[in-house]
Image (cartoon, grey):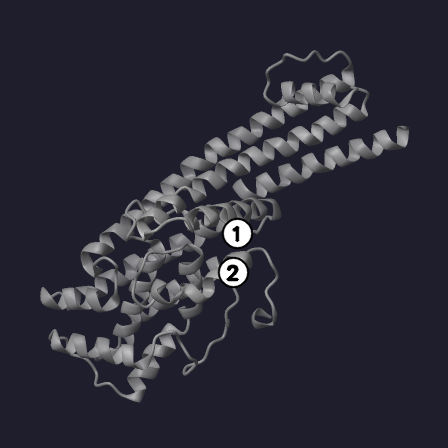
Amino acid sequence: MVVVDVVVFVLGAALVAFTLSAAVRTVVVPRGTPVMLTRVVFVGMRRLFNLWSRRAKTYEERDRAMALYAPFSLLSLAIVWLILVLSGYTAMFWAIGNNPLRDAFRISGSSIFTLGFAALTDLPSTVLGISEAGLGLFLLALLITYLPSVYATFSRREQVVALLEVRAGSPPSAAEMIERFARIDWLDRLDDLWSQWESWFVDIEETHTSLPALVFFRSPQPDRSWVTAAGAMLDTASFVASSFPGHHPDAELCVRSGSIAMRRIADFFEIPYNPNPERGDPISVGREEYEEMHARLVRAGVTLRPVTDETWLDFAGWRVNYDVVLLALASITMAPYAPWSSDRSLSFRRAAFTSWGRRRRASRQ
């Protein structure tokens, strides 16, 4: 029996250590490191919400359901932490002689929630009880400090997304943005946007990998999404860099910044993509769509380079850097309809989310 007690105590301590490590890596460590426990909770909750959202008859109903996904998953994660710590300490209390198992569970529950209704009569039990109470408070404190950081970052992200609606319409698109700027003779002011959005991309790269739950926090308005906003800005910058006369280095830097940010977020979710695409590689936007946008803007009075193989390859050469990851992120976030992003992301929906936490296959080697 002594051997059994030792094994049970070690297993209980290992479970507590595993949970504490997962909590710290999820909340405290400022680095986008996939955590198995967090992944299991979020993927499990996603499957439940997928079942719920399938009953929705309209996008608005599905959006209302999915708006609860990230908050509920975060709260469920804290509950899972407490349950695992409770279970680990129950095993340790049982191993040091608090029998039967019901008594060990009662002492563990009394300690983790600092209720104090179960008496601790010996030194080993007292030491375990005090450590469990401290750990329980620590986990709750982590969650309490984590949530304000999440919502502050969410608010900062959404402020820029909301401003885009005035400039690019709802849903946002590159064609709409350029046409609106041409209508008010502000095409020269497009250059003012690139540095703002370059900073925004840098911000979401850091925050959406260190606080990955933010990826699934939906915008206050059902027709907005950080993913479709990013896609509209990247397409605008790509079109300006490829199809406007002259050289536009600020637009090119914006595309590079956005592509890096979207790829880093995709890396966290183990979304496969070609890390070294080449000019001429296929993209999800067809040449006919590019030519339609070009013709629309010419009719709006925008001066553009003529449509040639060169201009099309230039545009496709910029778009290929973010094409796959944009569609995949639109899919896993169930982004609202927007041209050239979520409107063609259904093929990614089944595979993209379930790949979170798995090793990248040969395409990422």
Question: For the N terminus, which image quadrant?
Answer: top right
Task: Report how many numbered discs are placed on residues in the image.
Answer: 2
Residue at 21% across, 83% down: 305
Contact? badges 1 and 2 (CB < 8 Å): yes
Residue 352 shows in this picture: yes
Residue 244 shows in this picture: no
Mark 2 surroundings: few (<14), some (14-19) or many (≥20) residues within 10 A: many
**Quarter of the image where one finds residue 111:** top right
Question: For the C terminus, which image quadrant?
Answer: bottom right
Query: Relative to 280, is 82 on the left or the right?
Result: right
Q: Secondary structure at mark 2?
A: helix
Q: Amino acid at mark 2?
A: Asp
Nearer-the-camera pick, 351 or 6: 351
Q: Secondary structure at mark 1?
A: loop
What residue does disc 1 label?
A: 32
Residue at 67% across, 20% down: 130
What residue does disc 2 label?
A: 267
Residue at 51% across, 49% down: 47
